[in-house]
Image (cartoon, rainbow, N blue to C red):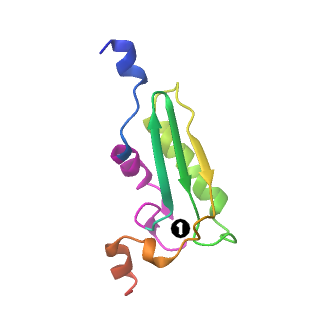
Amino acid sequence: MTSEAAVTSLPDVEAIRDILRQVIDPEVGINIVDLGLVYRIEVAPERLRVEMTMTSPACPMGEMIVNEVHVALAEALPDTCQPDVRLVWTPPWDPSMMSEDSRLHFGW
């Protein structure tokens, strides 16, 4: 691997998932990964796409959370990568998408 390739390579899907765990939904106090809001992470050379949702289309924190995703990714990714973060509504979020620990936290 050349030094240039090392500089522009992106973290793998699990590393991106760990980065996104830094983003907390302020209404429930749980990170967006364990809350089940991250639907898809696609990593390709110098490209990253994240598809995510909110607990509701009327979520008042949606824009703020998406901005925090961009900030967390910008801090961890090379300058050459501009992540494509897409807010999607299909499938609709429901509590079954949460991690088991998150469901237990709420007593579900």
Q: Secondary structure at mark 1?
A: loop
Q: Quadrant of the N terminus?
A: top left
Q: Is residue 45 above or below residue 53?
A: above
Q: Which residue occupies 59% across, 70% down?
A: 92
Q: Is residue 27 magenta?
A: yes
- The picture places residue 16, in percent across and down from the top left corner, at 40, 45
Q: Which residues are magenta?
A: 14-34
Q: Is residue 102 above or below residue 85?
A: below
Q: Amino acid at mark 1?
A: Pro
Q: Which residue occupies 57% across, 33% down?
A: 82
Please tell me which residue lies in front, 43 or 67.
Answer: 43
- The picture places residue 14, in percent across and down from the top left corner, at 34, 47
- The image quarter containing residue 5 is top left
Residue position for label 1: 26
Q: Is residue 95 magenta?
A: no
Q: Is residue 92 above or below residue 39?
A: below
Mark 1 Cα shell of 10 Å, populated few (<14), some (14-19), many (≥20): few
Please tell me which residue lies in front, 11 or 40.
Answer: 40
Q: Which residue occupies 62% across, 58% down?
A: 88
Q: Quadrant of the C terminus?
A: bottom left
The residue at the far bottom in this view is 107
Please tell me which residue lies in front, 3 or 94.
Answer: 94
- The image quarter containing residue 33 is bottom left
- The image quarter containing residue 93 is bottom right
Q: Viewed as shown, does residue 83 lie left or right of 29? A: right
- The picture places residue 2, in percent across and down from the top left corner, at 32, 12
- The picture places residue 86, in percent across and down from the top left corner, at 61, 50
Q: State the count of labels.
A: 1
Q: Viewed as shown, does residue 26 lie left or right of 86? A: left
Q: Which residue occupies 64% across, 62% down?
A: 62
